[in-house]
Image: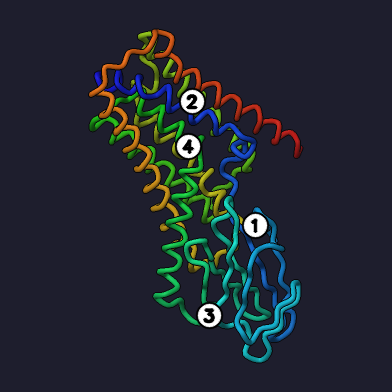
Amino acid sequence: MRAIQYLRLALPALMLALAMLMRPSALSAHEAAMGVLEFREVRPGAFVGRWSIEPSIGASRVDLRVPPHCFLRLPEMNCGAKGLVGPITITNLGSNMSVVLIKVIPIEGEPRSYTISTANPVVSVLGTGAPTLEVWLELARTYVNYGIDHILLGADHLLFVLGLIWIVGGGWRLLKTITAFTIGHSASLAAAAFGLIGVPERPLNACIALSIAFIGVEMVKQQRGEIGLTARYPWIVAFSFGLVHGIGFASALAGLGLERRLLPAALLFFNIGVEIGQLAFVLLVLALIWAHRRLDAVVPRWGEALPAYLIGSVSMFWFFGRLVRVFAVI
């Protein structure tokens, strides 16, 4: 209980910072910030290239370089008899675009996919052989970083985790609750990525916002001395809503056209990145609790209720904004 009291001292400032994330882009928090560049072979060695998802600053400003033997003038690229083999470099992606997926669709054989990030701007386009160790390492670096970026920029997910910490407190009970949430979103993320389940993204994002509103209501109940569902069964609530959030995570990987043989590894590395980011956030909140144990801070009575109402207000703002986007496409 003492940990919860200290958390209440720290949360108003933290919640005010998170409330600033209510920019329009947060209404679609799980949409992927990834560019997609497709090269489709139309005859041996000749390709048509196009951005199916353009980087945030526009494809015209991106510095794209292809293997030296290839001649590129989008949408045309000619690599001659040697074909598209060799290094591809993309730089100047922009602040909101950290990853570009390159899809190579040959006349014969399976499509191949490669990932480029701001940290690793060069990939080696290979033939049809098995992926090398270099390919696996590149995949790991890219998707771990992408998972970390996705979770730390996903304010809705962080608000939900923050609400769980508020209600559950610290210690082993918190560890078990966060573990249940992790198991839930990992399971649904894998099922959605492999096409076993599918939910339209925009209605799903509205449901995610409602899950945060639910946690806000549970926080208010706790302040009034009531024992809510989350306080009684934190692991069940965390696991159940984790399933919903996991499908939202899967939308970050949807439509990227990854080769089937690379999808399990990409999914694993992405999920590891998500967990690293989530753990970093939990440790940050716990560090605030620890720090406030050494402060003689006093907040007014109304200030103790502020975080719960901020979480509720932010989540409902997201919900109605996302609901408008749902009906806009009907």
| Residue 80 pos. (x, y %) | 68, 89
Work out whether mark 2 precedes mark 1 in sequence or the reverse, and give the earlier one: 2
Mark 4: few/some/many CA within 10 Å (<14, 14-19, 20+): many
Q: Amino acid at mark 3?
A: Leu
Looking at marks 2 and 4 on the same chain, the residue that comes earlier in the sequence is marked by 2
Badge 2, how many Cα within 10 Å: few under 14, some, many 20+? some
Q: Residue, x 33% and y 40% (percent of image)?
A: 179
**Apparent side of residue 7 relative to residue 64 in the rendered image (left or right):** left
Query: Spatial distance from mark 2 to mark 1, Cα to Cα?
Result: 30 Å
Residue wearing tag 2: 16
Q: Quadrant of residue 141?
A: bottom left
Q: Which residue is mark 4?
A: 157
Residue 52 in the image: x percent, y percent? 70, 61
- Quadrant of the frame with the N terminus: top left
How packed is label 3: few (under 14 Cα within 10 Å), some, or many (20 or more)?
Answer: some
- Look at discs 2 and 4 and give the one toward the viewer: 2
Q: Is 249 rendered above or below residue 140?
A: above
At numbered mark 1, what does the secondary structure look like: helix, strand or loop? Answer: loop
* Residue 5 in view (yes/no): yes
Q: Which residue is mark 1?
A: 55
